[in-house]
Structures are given as C-alpha cells and as structure tokens.
Amino acid sequence: GAVVSQHPSWVICKSGTSVKIECRSLDFQATTMFWYRQFPKQSLMLMATSNEGSKATYEQGVEKDKFLINHASLTLSTLTVTSAHPEDSSFYICSADTGAVSSGANVLTFGAGSRLTVL
Amino acid sequence: TQLLEQSPQFLSIQEGENLTVYCNSSSVFSSLQWYRQEPGEGPVLLVTVVTGGEVKKLKRLTFQFGDARKDSSLHITAAQPGDTGLYLCAGGGGTSYGKLTFGQGTILTVHP
C-alpha cells in the first residue's frame, strides 16, 4: 500500500531557530500533498496544500512567511517553520494524494506526524 | 467555508456498551470519510461513503451517510478497549479533490 514517511518524528528546538519537516511518499508519486497542524486532543487543521512544481496554497490565517512549503519533487514536500516560537509547538501531519480513487473519493495517505517542541 | 460539527467531543464508556458519533454540516459533501487516530500517529482511514443514504459496515462499526449528504454517523456495537482513540470525520467535495474538512473529533475511551 501507499506509504508516507515523515521526518523527524520528534524535534526540540530553541526559540528563534528554523525547523524543517519532510514528508515523503515512499512508493508512489504525489503531485499534491497537504500539511495539517494538530493541538493535543484536537482535530486536524489544514494549513496548506502543497503542489509539486508550484507555490503552495495556504489556508486563511496561516502565515506564508512563517511556514514555508516546498514541493520540489513528486515524492517530497517540506515544511519549514521559520523563527520558531513556543506557540508554534504542535503536532504537524502531512498527507499525500495517491492519485487513486476508491469509493468515489481521492485516496489520501497520512504520515505519522512530527511533534515540534519549541523551548 | 464548509464546516463539520462532530459530537460528542468526549465519550467515556464501559466495555460492551454501544455508542454513536455524529457528524453534521449545513453543506453538501461529495464524500465523507471516517478516520481513527492513536496518540503520536497519523489518522488511519476507516471508511469512505459517497452515496446519500449509504450504510457501510466494518465488523462492529456501522457508518451511515445522510440522504442529503450533509451528515454522517458512526455506530460502534459492543465497544472494546481496543476501540479507544480519536475518531475524526472528514468531508471532501467539489473541485477541491483530496482537500478535506475535518470535524472536531471525538475522543473515545472504553474502560475494561
């Protein structure tokens, strides 16, 4: 089956530094990936849609300069949290559109998530 | 903006009990998916429903899509401790293929 790998799974950084999170589709090509943010015991909030070879589409209220997304290849999208602050601490999850359709809907595969803690 | 209202947000029950989680919206969705997520992991797809009135069963789980494709429910029969987790409904629609709108989630705890 389609597998999405996220790295790192857990990262701690100092306030003011930048952190890069990778989302890789291991056995399929993904033209479109999605980045979500999740706070403890809460749902997933879509941050942006990452499109291979073009600029990401950000959801309302998400700072483009704060959360840089690059989708340079069909198997890799990266999310860089720039000048991180404690309030950026969260669980970041990516999903990839496998291109397959099942039961009339696009099949997405989610990564296992990356927990960011900013001190 | 399409919104999904999921209820209840928290559910704590004893093993063997039945439960229902609801997902409601004022918008029509072309498809609705249910996911289960465990702490520290990504969501795992349980089912996709696309036809109004559709009912799907997955062992002890029964999923229903409303006739108007605006609401859905998840019913678990004889819950077990292994069912504990965060359950999420997510709607997809229109030209935003693959772009999902998630409900708030239901944290289910099944006590032995």
Image (spheres, coloured by chain):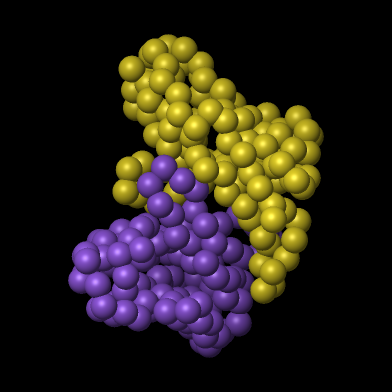
Chain colours: A yellow, B purple
On the question of residue B73 being in view, the answer is no
Quadrant assignment, res B48: bottom right
The residue under the point 77% across, 47% down is: A28
Tell me where residue A8 appears, x and y as whole percent.
53, 28
Left or right, A37 with respect to A77, comes to left
Q: Tell me if residue B45 comes above or below residue A43 in the rendering.
A: below
Q: Tell me if residue A74 comes above or below residue B105 in the rendering.
A: above
Q: Which image quadrant: the N terminus of chain A? A: bottom right
Q: Nearer the viewer, residue B20 or B25?
A: B20
Tell me where residue B37 appears, x and y as whole percent.
43, 54
Q: Nearer the viewer, residue B63 or B111?
A: B111
Left or right, B48 with respect to A28, comes to left
Q: Nearer the viewer, residue B93 or A99?
A: A99
The residue under the point 41% across, 20% down is: A12
Tell me where residue B90 appears, x and y as whole percent.
50, 62
Quadrant assignment, res B51: bottom right
The residue under the point 45% across, 60% down is: B36
Tell me where residue A17 appears, x and y as whole percent.
47, 12
Quadrant assignment, res B47: bottom right
